[in-house]
Image: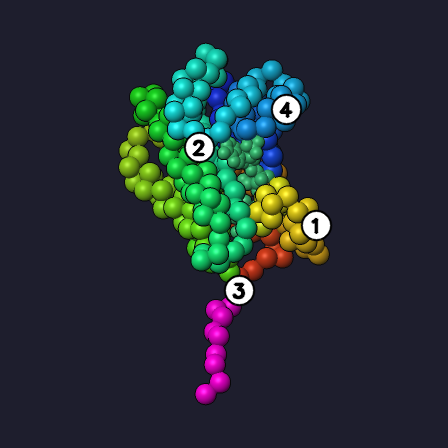
Amino acid sequence: MTARMVGQTVLVTGATSGIGCATAARFAASGARVVLVGRRAERLAELAATFGERVHGLVLDVRDHDGVMTALAELPEAFRNIDVLVNNAGLALGLASLETINFDDCTRMLETNCAAVLSMTRAVLPAMRERNRGHIVHMGSIASHVAYPGGNVYCATKAFVHQLSQSMKADLAGTGVRVTCIEPGMVETEFSEVRFGGDKEKAASVYRGMKALTPEDVAEAVFWCVSLPAHVNVNLIELMPTAQGFGPTIVKRVDR
Ligand code: NDP
Ligand code: 8X3
């Protein structure tokens, strides 16, 4: 239990897997009430049973703007006042070059990684402003500024998250509402399985022979930011595995 978190309500999107699941577990263990959001009802039910009674599972597709507004307004009373929103749900689909990428995949990434963050934030921010306290944590990525072949739309969505987070900090300066962006490098989760359309072998090869960050590593960073005193706003944290680094600039030369 962490005295500061007892009595606080934390809502985590994408809590059925990976970073969101570990973050929800971290807050539940700290004594906070936690709302777990995801589309997979069975996983939510299992997790809610594991994390204990201060947890509420909410089956919700965060891309459904009206559904988000209604579902958050209709949360059970004990969970309705959100103190901390962790905008974590997100995905990458494929690694195709922009001219060949499936356009529906582009739309799904934009809707999930960008538009849904706006919906979730707009659903909780008015009450946070009114109470003059709250914390919005965005799950960005090093992909916001580290480009790689096939990253195109995914990288651009995370650049959106980065800049949205910084701009919100500017909007909210002087209120009691804090805004943080967490930007991890490689974290071993279901992320690559989703990116490669369920191909587990291909997904596993992404993390082979190296020690990736664990979802718990990232959850700890989120928890640290939130558990600091109310006058401290961590704007941005970038973390990556010790084994990861930055690529050189590539020059494709032609013979003259
Ligand atoms: P996972 O695939 O393990 O988890 C993604 C979560 O998002 C799942 O719980 C999924 O739940 C949820 N989700 C996806 N779409 C929706 C939707 N439309 N509505 C509600 N929930 C949704 O991946 P990670 O834990 O790795 O990813 C979490 C975040 O971290 C993402 O924003 C990702 O971009 C970011 N990130 C990941 C990194 C990595 O290397 N893994 C590195 C940097 C950032 P469900 O399917 O049940 O809806
Ligand atoms: C996920 C990390 O490097 O695969 O955001 O884009 S990366």
Q: Tell me the residue at 55%/19% (across/down).
A: 56
Q: Which of marks 3 and 1 is in front?
A: 1
Disc assigned to residue 63 = 2
Q: Which tag, 4 or 2, sits closer to the chain's start?
A: 4
Report the amino acid beneath label 3: Gly
Q: Tell me the residue at 30%/34% (across/down).
A: 172
Residue named by callout 1: 201
Q: In this view, does 162 lie above or below 135?
A: below
* Residue at mark 3: C-beta within 8 A of ligand 2: no
Report which quarter residue 169 is drawn in.
top left
Camera-side residue: 236 or 68?
Answer: 68
Residue named by callout 4: 42
Q: Give the Cα distance between marks 4 and 2.
A: 20 Å
Camera-side residue: 144 or 93?
Answer: 93
Q: Is residue 106 magenta?
A: no
Report the amino acid beneath label 1: Glu
Q: Given contact means CB atoms under 8 Å apart, are the residues at marks 3 and 1 in contact?
A: no
Residue named by callout 3: 247
Q: Give the Cα distance between marks 3 and 1.
A: 24 Å
Per the rendered image, the range of residues in magenta is: 247-256
In the rendered view, does 251 fall on the left or right side of 51? Answer: left
Q: Give the Cα distance between marks 4 and 3.
A: 40 Å
Q: Give the Cα distance between marks 2 and 1.
A: 29 Å
Q: Is mark 1 on a helix, strand or loop?
A: helix
Q: Is mark 4 on a helix, strand or loop?
A: helix
Specify the quadrant that holds the N terminus: top right
Q: Which tag, 3 or 2, sits closer to the chain's start?
A: 2
Q: What element carries label 2?
A: loop
Q: Give the Cα distance between marks 3 and 2.
A: 34 Å
Q: In this view, does 26 lie above or below 9?
A: below
Of the four image quadrants, the one with ligand 1 is top right
